[in-house]
Amino acid sequence: MDEQKRLIERIETAEQRMLRLAVRTRCAPLLTLDLTIQQLKTLHVLAQEGALSGHELAKVLGVGAATASGIIDRLVVRGLVQRTKDSHDRRVRRVALTADGQRIVEELASASREYRRRLLARLDLDTLSQLADALEKLHAAAEDEAREQDVAAGP
Protein backbone atom coordinates (compact mmCIF):
# COMPACT_ATOMS: atom_id res chain seq x y z
CA MET A 1 0.00 0.00 0.00
CA ASP A 2 1.39 3.37 -0.90
CA GLU A 3 2.00 6.06 1.72
CA GLN A 4 -0.91 8.29 0.66
CA LYS A 5 -3.46 5.47 1.03
CA ARG A 6 -1.99 4.46 4.40
CA LEU A 7 -2.24 8.03 5.71
CA ILE A 8 -5.80 8.42 4.41
CA GLU A 9 -6.76 5.23 6.25
CA ARG A 10 -5.17 6.58 9.45
CA ILE A 11 -7.14 9.79 9.11
CA GLU A 12 -10.40 7.92 8.47
CA THR A 13 -9.82 5.67 11.45
CA ALA A 14 -9.06 8.64 13.69
CA GLU A 15 -12.21 10.43 12.48
CA GLN A 16 -14.35 7.36 13.22
CA ARG A 17 -12.88 7.04 16.71
CA MET A 18 -13.48 10.77 17.35
CA LEU A 19 -17.07 10.47 16.14
CA ARG A 20 -17.77 7.61 18.54
CA LEU A 21 -16.44 9.69 21.45
CA ALA A 22 -18.34 12.77 20.30
CA VAL A 23 -21.64 10.89 20.36
CA ARG A 24 -21.21 10.42 24.11
CA THR A 25 -20.12 13.96 24.91
CA ARG A 26 -20.81 16.62 22.33
CA CYS A 27 -24.11 15.22 21.05
CA ALA A 28 -25.99 15.37 24.35
CA PRO A 29 -28.10 18.36 23.20
CA LEU A 30 -28.84 16.59 19.92
CA LEU A 31 -29.98 13.43 21.63
CA THR A 32 -32.50 15.32 23.76
CA LEU A 33 -34.34 16.65 20.70
CA ASP A 34 -37.36 14.86 19.35
CA LEU A 35 -36.61 15.61 15.70
CA THR A 36 -35.95 13.38 12.71
CA ILE A 37 -32.73 13.62 10.74
CA GLN A 38 -34.65 15.26 7.86
CA GLN A 39 -36.11 17.84 10.24
CA LEU A 40 -32.65 18.61 11.65
CA LYS A 41 -31.25 18.89 8.12
CA THR A 42 -34.05 21.29 7.26
CA LEU A 43 -33.30 23.50 10.26
CA HIS A 44 -29.61 23.46 9.39
CA VAL A 45 -30.22 24.36 5.73
CA LEU A 46 -32.52 27.24 6.68
CA ALA A 47 -29.97 28.50 9.21
CA GLN A 48 -27.28 28.49 6.51
CA GLU A 49 -29.30 29.68 3.52
CA GLY A 50 -32.01 31.84 5.05
CA ALA A 51 -35.62 31.71 3.89
CA LEU A 52 -36.22 29.39 0.93
CA SER A 53 -39.23 28.44 -1.12
CA GLY A 54 -40.55 24.94 -0.56
CA HIS A 55 -39.23 23.98 -4.01
CA GLU A 56 -35.75 25.33 -3.24
CA LEU A 57 -35.71 23.55 0.10
CA ALA A 58 -36.79 20.26 -1.49
CA LYS A 59 -33.98 20.56 -4.03
CA VAL A 60 -31.33 21.24 -1.38
CA LEU A 61 -32.59 18.35 0.77
CA GLY A 62 -32.74 16.03 -2.25
CA VAL A 63 -36.39 15.12 -1.69
CA GLY A 64 -39.62 15.59 -3.60
CA ALA A 65 -41.92 18.55 -3.09
CA ALA A 66 -44.49 16.44 -1.23
CA THR A 67 -41.86 15.11 1.18
CA ALA A 68 -40.50 18.60 1.80
CA SER A 69 -44.02 19.89 2.41
CA GLY A 70 -44.59 17.19 5.03
CA ILE A 71 -41.33 18.01 6.80
CA ILE A 72 -42.20 21.70 6.76
CA ASP A 73 -45.73 21.03 8.05
CA ARG A 74 -44.39 19.11 11.05
CA LEU A 75 -41.83 21.83 11.81
CA VAL A 76 -44.53 24.53 11.54
CA VAL A 77 -46.69 22.64 14.05
CA ARG A 78 -43.72 22.53 16.44
CA GLY A 79 -43.15 26.26 15.99
CA LEU A 80 -39.65 25.83 14.55
CA VAL A 81 -40.29 27.24 11.06
CA GLN A 82 -42.85 29.53 9.51
CA ARG A 83 -44.24 29.98 6.03
CA THR A 84 -44.60 33.49 4.65
CA LYS A 85 -45.62 34.89 1.28
CA ASP A 86 -42.78 35.88 -1.02
CA SER A 87 -42.68 39.66 -1.41
CA HIS A 88 -41.94 39.35 -5.15
CA ASP A 89 -44.33 36.52 -6.05
CA ARG A 90 -47.43 35.99 -3.92
CA ARG A 91 -47.84 32.45 -5.31
CA VAL A 92 -44.59 31.42 -3.62
CA ARG A 93 -44.42 30.59 0.09
CA ARG A 94 -41.04 31.00 1.76
CA VAL A 95 -39.93 28.91 4.72
CA ALA A 96 -37.80 30.43 7.46
CA LEU A 97 -36.69 29.58 10.97
CA THR A 98 -38.66 30.96 13.88
CA ALA A 99 -36.87 32.21 16.98
CA ASP A 100 -37.28 28.74 18.54
CA GLY A 101 -35.85 27.07 15.42
CA GLN A 102 -32.91 29.46 15.43
CA ARG A 103 -32.33 28.79 19.14
CA ILE A 104 -32.11 25.02 18.54
CA VAL A 105 -29.61 25.46 15.72
CA GLU A 106 -27.53 27.84 17.81
CA GLU A 107 -27.56 25.51 20.84
CA LEU A 108 -26.35 22.59 18.73
CA ALA A 109 -23.64 24.69 17.09
CA SER A 110 -22.56 26.09 20.45
CA ALA A 111 -22.28 22.64 22.02
CA SER A 112 -20.19 21.43 19.08
CA ARG A 113 -17.98 24.53 19.13
CA GLU A 114 -17.37 24.31 22.88
CA TYR A 115 -16.48 20.62 22.65
CA ARG A 116 -14.04 21.31 19.80
CA ARG A 117 -12.46 24.21 21.71
CA ARG A 118 -11.95 22.07 24.81
CA LEU A 119 -10.17 19.45 22.70
CA LEU A 120 -8.04 22.00 20.84
CA ALA A 121 -7.02 23.64 24.13
CA ARG A 122 -5.35 20.34 25.06
CA LEU A 123 -2.93 20.60 22.11
CA ASP A 124 0.42 22.39 22.14
CA LEU A 125 1.07 25.42 19.91
CA ASP A 126 3.11 23.50 17.35
CA THR A 127 0.37 20.90 16.90
CA LEU A 128 -2.30 23.62 16.68
CA SER A 129 -0.26 25.40 14.00
CA GLN A 130 0.15 22.20 11.98
CA LEU A 131 -3.55 21.43 12.32
CA ALA A 132 -4.53 24.95 11.22
CA ASP A 133 -2.28 24.64 8.16
CA ALA A 134 -3.67 21.22 7.31
CA LEU A 135 -7.30 22.33 7.66
CA GLU A 136 -6.69 25.40 5.49
CA LYS A 137 -5.22 23.12 2.80
CA LEU A 138 -8.16 20.72 3.17
CA HIS A 139 -10.55 23.66 2.74
CA ALA A 140 -8.73 24.72 -0.43
CA ALA A 141 -9.03 21.16 -1.76
CA ALA A 142 -12.77 21.20 -0.95
CA GLU A 143 -13.17 24.49 -2.85
CA ASP A 144 -11.35 22.99 -5.85
CA GLU A 145 -13.61 19.93 -5.72
CA ALA A 146 -16.74 22.10 -5.53
CA ARG A 147 -15.61 24.19 -8.53
CA GLU A 148 -14.92 21.03 -10.54
CA GLN A 149 -18.36 19.64 -9.69
CA ASP A 150 -20.00 22.95 -10.66
CA VAL A 151 -18.20 22.89 -14.02
CA ALA A 152 -19.15 19.24 -14.60
CA ALA A 153 -22.80 19.96 -13.74
CA GLY A 154 -22.94 22.74 -16.33
CA PRO A 155 -25.32 25.69 -16.40
Image (cartoon, rainbow, N blue to C red):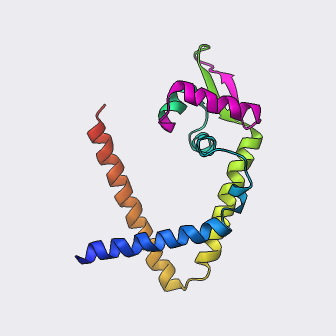
What segment carries the magenta color?
Answer: 60-88
Q: Is residue 43 left or right of residue 133?
A: right
Image: 91 above or below 109: above
Q: Nearer the viewer, residue 100 or 10?
A: 10
Camera sees residue 27: yes
Q: Locate residue 27, reporting x and y percent.
A: 66, 62
What residue sits 54% from the left and 32% below the top? 57
What residue sits 56% from the left and 24% below the top? 66
Is 109 part of what is drawn in magenta? no
Q: Locate residue 5, reporting x and y percent.
A: 28, 72
Extreme residue toward the left, this view: 2
Q: Quadrant of residue 94?
A: top right
Image: 2 above or below 146: below
Looking at the rendered structure, the number of numbered marks drawn on it comes to: 0
Q: Locate residue 40, reporting x and y percent.
A: 63, 45
Camera sees residue 53: no
Q: Is residue 128 left or right of residue 116?
A: left
What residue sits 57% from the left and 42% below the top? 45
Image: 53 above or below 20: above
Q: Is residue 71 left or right of residue 4?
A: right
Q: Locate residue 2, reporting x and y percent.
A: 22, 76
Is 78 part of what is drawn in magenta? yes
What residue sits 47% from the left and 78% below the top? 129
- Which quarter of the image is occupied by the N terminus? bottom left
Image: 15 above or below 50: below
Q: Quadrant of residue 111?
A: bottom right
Q: Nearer the viewer, residue 46 or 42?
A: 42
- Which quarter of the image is occupied by the C terminus? top left
